[in-house]
Amino acid sequence: MILRTPPPKKQRSEPMHHESPSPLVAAEGPLIIYEDSPLVAPPPESSHQPSDHLLCTYQCRQMVKADVLDALSNAEKQISDYQSKLEALSESLSKAEAERKKFKDQFLYAEQELAAAKGREQMLHDQLLKEVNDSQERFKKHLETNNELKGKLQNEMNLRKKAESSASSAEEKAADLEGKLTQFSQSMEREKKRLHNELAQLKGESKLSVSRISADLERMEFRANNAEKESELLKEQLEDLKKQLNECLNQKNEVEKKFSSFTFQEVTSSESSILIKHLQEELRNYESEVREARKLKSSHEDIELLKAKLLEEKGRRERAESELSKLQEQHISLNNLENELSLWKVIMKDIPDVSCPEDIPVKFATLQKEVIESTIKIGEVNARLKQIEVGLDAAELAKQNAEADAALVKEKAEVLKSEFKRTEHMLSLVTEERDKLRNVINESRSHKNEVADGTVVQELESSLAKKESCIKELERNLHEHKEINDRQHNEIKLLHDRLNNEARRIKSLERESDRLRSEISLLESKLGHGDYSAANTKVLRMVNTLAVDNEAKQTIEALQTELQKTKEKLQALEELKSQSGETGKLVDSYISEKIMKLKEQIATLEKREERYKTVFADRISVFRRACCELFGYKIVMDEHQRPNGIPVTHFTLQSIYAQNDDEKLEFEYESGNTNILANNYTAQPEISHQVDIFVRKLNSIPAFTANLTVESFNRRTLS
Amino acid sequence: MASRSVAKDIITLRGSAAIVSEFFGYAANSILYNRGVYPEESFAKVKKYGLPMLLTQDEGVKSFISNLTAQLSEWLEAGKLQRVVLVIMSKASNEVLERWNFSIETDGEVVEKGVSREKSDKEIMREIQAIMRQIASSITYLPCIDEPCKTKTSKLTPYFAQMFDFYEVSRPDTVSATFGHGSKRHRLPQQDVSLSHSHLMLFTGVFDVLAYTDTDVAVPFTWIESDPKLIANPQMVKLHSFDTKIHKVDTLVSYKNDEWDEQ
């Protein structure tokens, strides 16, 4: 069978029908399609009815062909449209895919950045942790060093206490030793004093003996003087008596003269005999008086001798008592010395390393050295202590600084932690957004809807932009915070420095103000006091004429009063003179008589003196001759003064048995002491030997002179 | 205040020197009277600085003070005077008992250039008045100058004698004089005052005037160079000062510590 409708066309129309059923329905009537479709479907059915169709007219077929052709063209147009649309869609798809890739890349980039930020955060965190650990370690180290230093301090304190205690004990020992030394020294001094006293006592005793001898000599001399005085007194009495006798004789002569001149008639012999008897009685009376005087003198002499003996014995008794007391004192001193010696020995036993008194200063020197060394050690320990204290202070300061640093670091850590939390939060937000984005991307992939892709892409873009902005903001915030912190730190440091400077300035100013105040007060006091500088000031005083006037006035007044007094005196004197002028003659005669009497008295006294001198010269020459003949020596006496003003009597003795004039002995008598003087004669060996024996050893000049007399007599007689 | 806006008076160097030297003259008289250097019968009352001031009538003292003030005025005009000191000494021992110190600060510009200043005369007078009152009241704390002050009554009589005189002279209405020494204040009946007059002390002191000048000053023939007659360990009391804008005068009294007070 020949088919009028080609089968492939039917096939072509089938897919077209499949693809766009709806527009075909709208374009063609349901007839064609239905027919086609049934044509297609039931093609076998159509074969059954070929005749029927063949029966259709050519027009129908042409119509159908035209319709089919139109439909074909339309379909082709549609197909081309659809193809263009497809191409456009595919292009858009590719674009979307490209954009999707871009977004993916961006997303990955953002993820990388996130990862980098995370890494940075972790780094920062690690750094923070490291810093915190470092600071903690430093803190721990500081604490350890503090503890060590504290331990050292305590050790040093203990050492110091020990050293101080040892120093104090050493000082106490030293003080004890010093006290003991002083005691020793005092005892030594006391001993010395006692020895000196003993020496002095011995000297005194020797002086006493010397004085005894001198006293004996003096006695002898006093006796001689007394004898002289007695002789003088006797002489005086003799002279008085002689004078009286002379006077009586004179009176008698005068009376006799008068008698003879006046009345040789009237005076009877009885009166003259009476007169003579009177005179004789007077003479006898005088003689008796002279005897009594002599007896009195002898008794006086005996009394004086007895008194002298009494005095000697009293002196001896006193000396004996003093010596007894001295003996007792010496016994007491001996006992004290023995006690001290025993104490000394006991103390010596107490002191270690001391066996004899000489070791004590050595021991003391060693102890002093020990004390010095211990003080030096104490000083060193103190210095070390101070250094340690300084180190402690520095360590405490460092500790405080470290604590401050640690606090700061902690704050930083907390701040960073907070920031970290913030970033983590941001991260979580970002991851959530990422997940969302991923989901969106997956959804977009699965649906492959262009419109939906665009919105998702926009959302992604917006979210990414937001993230980026957030990240930038975070970074900016971080930077700002850092800058702010740094600025604040710097400001704080600057402020601290300024504070310190200001505090120092304030202190210095306060000190200056105190100093200035003190200076001001000083200056004010000086000002008030009246001080001045001589460089630019001089002090002038007005000559106080008032005072001068006052003084002048006073002197004038005083002079005037004196003048008045003298005037009054003058007036009184003149009155007296005027008064005395009336009874002038009597007064004159009285005064002249008085003057005459006084002159006569003077004359008689001068005559007496001359008589005494002559009589004394006679008597003394007699005495000297008698002494010479009795003792065998011619004594020549001279008096002169030594340069120090003490009068000294010089005696020169020459024996009557001397063979030549050079054999003279010279003695010096001074206030009770007689000393033999050396000369050529006494320098001879025999004489000097005698002098040594008798004078120096036996202390007896009379024995020496007697011996010399005997020897010279023997020599004379033998020769 | 109207007084404050009063027109100020022009003061020249010469005028200021005259004011200061006059002040010193009256101050010296006041001190001599109040310290009993001369008996009060030898003083006469005059009105000055708004107060009754006492001037000595003794010719010697008068001439002395007038010569002194003339010389001071000369030195003040030359700007050479630095200080004036009135020294009160014991006649018996020549020991310095009191030093009345008047320090003078001179405005150098006025001396060099001869310019004048302005200050109210009343103001200056008021300031001087204050100083005079202080001088008069200084006897309440200054130790007595009569010697020997062994009993309390004898110590007090000179004080209330002087005090009463001052009150009598200046304020005749306030007859009931109050005198004080230290913290005790006693009212004095009239009878005792009259007795106290009879118990007047025998002043045994002399006074002297010292001038501290510049070293280039020529010494006048009535003046001689002297030692400053200082007191060892003095008690010092600073009084008021007055200022003429050309010369500023500070007053200070330093006195020897009284042994009675120290016991």
Image: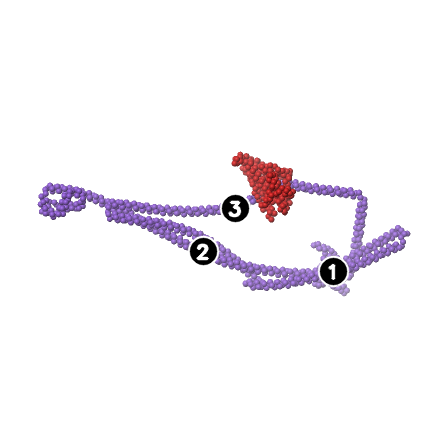
Q: Amino acid at mark 2?
A: Leu
> For mark 2, what is the residue?
A149
Q: Are marks 2 and 3 on the same chain?
A: yes
Mark 3, chain letter? Answer: A
Indicate the secondary structure of the residue bearing disc 2: helix
In the image, taking residue A17 as reference, residue A318 lies left or right, namely: right
Helix, strand or loop at label 1? It is helix
Instruction: Name the mark on residue A307.
Output: 1
> Which sits in the foreground, A126 or A678?
A126
Q: Are marks 1 and 2 in contact (CB under 8 Å)?
A: no
Tag 1–tag 3 contact (CB < 8 Å): no
Q: Looking at this view, is A349 or A693 the one in front?
A: A349
- Discs 1 and 2 carry the same chain letter: yes
Estimate the x, y position of residue A270 in percent, counting from the top left. Answer: 89, 55
Type of amino acid under label 3: Arg
- At numbered mark 3, what does the secondary structure look like: helix, strand or loop? helix
- Specify the color scheme: by chain
Cα separation, mark 2 vs mark 3, equals 41 Å
In this view of the protein, which residue sits in the foreground, B67 or A638? B67
Q: Residues within 10 Å of mark 1 (few under 14, many from 20)?
A: few
Mark drawn on residue A50 = none
Is B202 positioned to the left or the right of A611 in the image? Answer: left
Q: Specify the chain shown as red.
A: B
